[in-house]
Image: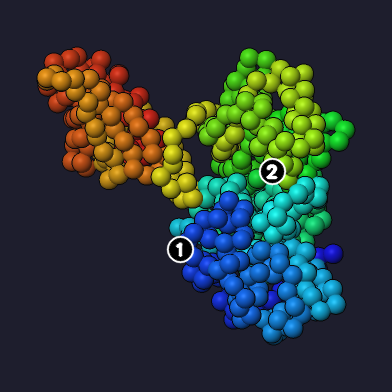
Amino acid sequence: MLNPDPDLCRHLAADLAAAKFRSEPLRARWGVEADDAIGRTLRTPALRGLGDATDPQAVLARLLIFGVAQPVSHVDVALPRLGSAGLAALGLARIDGVTVTPIAIVRPQSFHDDRGPGEWIVAADLDEIATGGGPLAEDHVLGVGGASLTLAGLQLPTEAGSVLDLGTGCGVQALRARRYADRVVATDISERALAFTRMNAALAVISGIDVREGSLFDPVAGERFDRIVSNPPFVITPRAQGVPAYEYRDGGLVGDALVESVVAGAGQHLVPGGTAQFLANWETKDGVSGLDRFRAWVEASPVALDAWVIERESLNPTEYAEMWIRDGGTAPGSPAHDRLLTAWLDDFAARGVSGIGFGYVLLRRAAADPTLARYERVAQPIPSEGALGSHLAAALAAHDAQAALSDDELSGRILVTAPDVTETRHYLPGAENPTVIELRQGGGFGRSVQADPALAGLVGASDGELTVGQIIDALAQLLEVDETALRGSVLPAVRALIDDAFLSL
């Protein structure tokens, strides 16, 4: 059983620091090629890089990162304050005679946000890198993975009084939120997950995280927060006998009903103007697209919500089932895999599901009528996905500013084109005028927008000198078109470019 004793955690953190148990020194030790292999769940190249060395860094890397048992004598030297007995007392290892066998991973996790770089030590259950494969336990507590890093990067890096981390898992979202929030409430149905959250907060010497057990919003009934973040157990799992229900990913409901419940409850637990950010799946069902179904959930919310929902990928039922069966540790081609795949496909077929979307959700409790309702598919590579939080915060502020302006007021404002915007013109051979004008964004979502000559001209002339109205007047004369008609066609596009950070007020 895990025992997140603060004194033992403090001793472990000190010993790991002394051993240079940090991301960069470890990567340097086993090399770039081996580090890339770790990303593919292969540990052998890194273990070869460590060789037979018995210094503290090598011993602790084998034991805590790669799940390889080590001699008690070596561990005691590597952990002079904690010792192997202390590691066992924390519930992270067991002592078998003269051998220390890990029962959890403890890994450094570096990050970078608006406040600069940092690193945490994060403990979680043994994963595929440490075990070499095989089915996971249903109460498995996931460590830091791709999804959790994505959500951490999406978090708005603006100040908040209170944040709810719904379904905290090992607590990494709570740690990230605490960097800008006065206090964080972290909830989960898993006692083991909450113990890991307490341990990881103690290892990071972070206070102000209130850990509570319970399902969804039950532990915070009647409370409101400035921010909600969540990597909820949104994975769609058949409710069939013999299909494992992993606590870290399966909310126990049919289809995408868990996500619908999060949408329904989020607004009631936000203060006016408060935001909720989470990852989710949504089903295309009975011919209705997943994004349209999501829109209906938002519109059915008991409180008014602004919404920005971004679908990053869409999978067919077979692709989706294969991905999550493999995630649970069941190898393709095995009888168990075929049985699980059949259960998944039967469930999707019975419920009329033809596709499953995955994406990012940003909801905001509206003070009055909602002004933001964006439901979009963004398939292109994102230049810096780990830093999207800053872009989202700026985009929300820009949207609010332009939405508050009438067309006449917007025409009187001065705009500046963002420094990362470039323009490309495509011509047919010998043609005098371009057939396509494309505006590209180097940051943010890396968007590409097709523009007509008038819009391209306005973007090119927005250098902080002339008002929007003055530029439109000049373009109308140059293009020999009606000024009023041009204004009516250009201003909606200008608002969209402000929302997407091509232009700034």
Relative to 289, residue 444 above or below: below
Q: Residue at x 76, y 67 (%)?
A: 102
Q: Is residue 32 left or right of residue 483?
A: right
Classify 10 Å Cα crowding around label 1: few (below 14), some (14-19), many (20 and above): few
Say which of marks 1 and 2 sits in front.
2
Relative to 31, residue 149 above or below: above
Q: Is residue 371 left or right of residue 122?
A: left
Q: Position of residue 265 (x, y in %)?
A: 71, 37
Q: For residue 480, which quarter of the picture?
A: top left
Q: Residue at x 76, y 49 (%)?
A: 134
Residue closest to the eye, 17 or 452: 17
Q: In this view of the protein, can residue 383 be seen by the observer? A: yes
Mark 1 and mark 2 lie on one chain; the one further toward the N terminus is: 1
Looking at the rendered image, the quarter that the N terminus falls into is: bottom right
Classify 10 Å Cα crowding around label 2: few (below 14), some (14-19), many (20 and above): few
Q: Tag 2, which secondary structure?
A: helix
Q: In this view of the protein, can residue 254 be seen by the observer? A: no
For residue 327, the mark is 2
Relative to 245, residue 452 above or below: above
Q: Residue at x 50, y 29 (%)?
A: 377
Looking at the rendered image, the quarter that the C terminus falls into is: top left
Compute the Cα span from label 1 to label 2. Answer: 32 Å
Q: Which three-letter amino acid code belongs to the residue tagged 1?
A: Gly
**Residue bearing the label numbered 1:** 116
Q: Position of residue 283 (x, y in %)?
A: 65, 26
Relative to 309, residue 429 above or below: above
Q: Tag 1, which secondary structure?
A: strand
